Structures are given as structure tokens and as C-alpha cells.
Image (tube, rainbow, N blue to C red):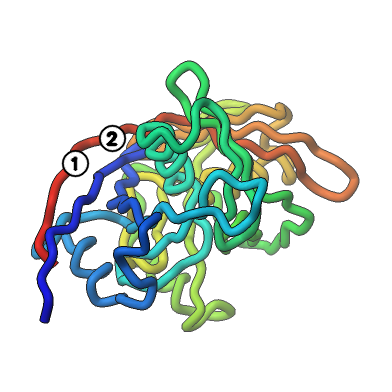
Amino acid sequence: MKIMNLTFYKYQGTGNDFVIIDNRQSILTKNDTKLFARLCDRKFGIGADGLMLLELPENEEDDFTMVYFNADGNESSMCGNGGRCLVAFAAFMGVIKEQATFTAIDGKHKAEIKDGLVYLQMQDVSTIEEYDSHLFLDTGSPHHVAIVDNLTNYDVVNIGREIRNGAPYFEKGSNVNFVEKETNNIFAVRTYERGVEDETLSCGTGVTAVALSMHNTEQADGDEIVVKTLGGDLKVTFTKTEKGYRDVFLIGPAVQVFKGEIEC
């Protein structure tokens, strides 16, 4: 078996951390799930919530393509913090300057780097399902959103795992967000992420889901909502229309932690 030294970069966005690999020369195949899982392993690999490949654009108007894998090595749905980190990486590599257009698994995204923050346009959301105990919506990834009391001491891992694997989600699963209101347009959230199968310090699509859910249920009245995660604060802006939410932006920092090489 051929062994190679693989160059990687480690990024984090409000504590949501990722291994990023420049795959524009197709040095890795996208079906090597065991390798991706090993690289994300915090004991035997680099350690990360997920792994991303920066690939050549498939469309003329794009700057690059985003391919995202969960920590379990499987290709996954959209990751908002990952998208912000990949935009920052693309700028670091000289692929873009301040603005980007790219395609991810959920479709096309636009982004801008401004004042040290990455503004990532998320997909429009037309449907938010409301139930007695929670809300459900898809912001590029599926999200269960529940309002709770005493979030600091809430058993996110065990209750989140039970919801993620239970009805109606079962094997496909859903990310699970537990929310507590602080003020009118400021909320705290803790998230159990499928694919990581644990609580993460932050989840970008989850933060987006929380902001839209809180506005849709009139828990918030502004079009700019701050969501506090364990890893830091993120901001979500949007425009409400009769058809739902458009011009949805996830805004926050994306930081390179280190560059390295690993044998694989």
C-alpha cells in the first residue's frame, strides 16, 4: 500500500473545528470514508468535527466546490461553519479575494469576507414545521429546535441522542438544538450533531435554524439575531417574505489554527 504525506489545514469557526484539504489536484478520492474518519479521530488522527475538500469548480460562475464529510467519514449535508471556514481557506490559498461563489451539496452559496468575519449566504427556507414540543426545518441540514429552561445544566448529549435516533427521524437522523432565550433578539443554543454523534461547540446550520425558528414563532422581532454557542457568538440576518425566509446570512469568524502533514 502506497503511503503519502498529506498536507492539511485545521480551521475553526466558533469552536466548530475542521480538517481542510486542498483537493484541486484530486489527490484524494471522495469514497475513502475510513481515511476521513481516521483524520477526524481525536485520539488517532488530527481531530475534528468534520473534514472538507476544496475542489475545482464544476460550474463556470463558481470559484470552487465544497465537499463536506462528517467526523464518521461519511459525506454529509451542508455545514454552515464549515462553509465559512472553507471560504476563509480559499482566500488564504488565493483562490478568491473578498467575495466567493461556490457550490456545496445543498446548492449554490455566495460569501463575503468583511472586517475579519465571513458572511455566508444560506439557502432560502420556505417551510418551518411547528409542533407542541419543538420545531423542525432544513437549513441545508435537518434541525430539530426545542426551547428549554436551564440550558447550562441541560443533558444535551443523552436527550439529543435519544431525539436524533427516535421517531420520526430514526436512522436518517436530525441535528438537535436546545435553545434558551436571553433577550428579545439574543438566544443561547447547545447542539447535538448527527455524524459527530456528540455535542459540538457550535453548529452553523443549527444557529441559522434557531434564528429563523425564533423569529417565526415571534420569540424575536428583529431581522438580525445573535445566537450564542459554547464556542462563541454568531449572527444571522434575513428577510422575511410571504413565502418564508430569503437573503439568509450566517455571520461569524473563521480562523486557521495550524497547518500540518500526516502520513496516510
Please indicate, yes or no, whether residue 37 appears anywhere in the rendered image: yes
Q: How far across and how far down the image is residue 50, in percent? A: 33, 58
Q: What numbered label is drawn on residue 83? A: none
Task: Determine the residue positioned at 54% across, 77% down.
Answer: 169
Numbered circles on residues, count: 2
Q: Which residue is mark 1?
A: 259
Identity of the residue furthest to the top in this view: 115
Q: Quadrant of residue 162?
A: bottom left
Q: Is residue 139 above or below residue 215?
A: below
Q: How far across and how far down the image is residue 25, in percent? A: 36, 58
Q: Amino acid at mark 1?
A: Lys
Mark 2: secondary structure: strand
Q: Residues within 10 Å of mark 2 (few under 14, many from 20)?
A: some
Q: Is residue 105 above or below residue 228?
A: below
Is 129 situated left or right of 5 in this image? right
Q: Amino acid at mark 2?
A: Gln
Q: CA distance from mark 1 to mark 2?
A: 8 Å
Is 3 situated left or right of 189 in this image? left
Q: Quadrant of the C terminus?
A: bottom left
Task: Determine the residue positioned at 64% across, 61% down.
Answer: 136
Task: Determine the residue positioned at 33% across, 58% down.
Answer: 51
Task: Determine the residue positioned at 30% across, 64% down.
Answer: 27
Q: How far across and how far down the image is residue 159, in percent? A: 39, 65
Q: Are marks 1 and 2 in contact (CB under 8 Å)?
A: yes
Q: How far across and how far down the image is residue 259, in percent? A: 19, 41
Identity of the residue furthest to the right in this view: 242
Please indicate, yes or no, whether residue 206 appears anywhere in the rendered image: no
Q: Quadrant of the N terminus?
A: bottom left
Q: Which residue is mark 2?
A: 256
Closer to viewer: mark 1 or mark 2: 1
Mark 1: secondary structure: strand
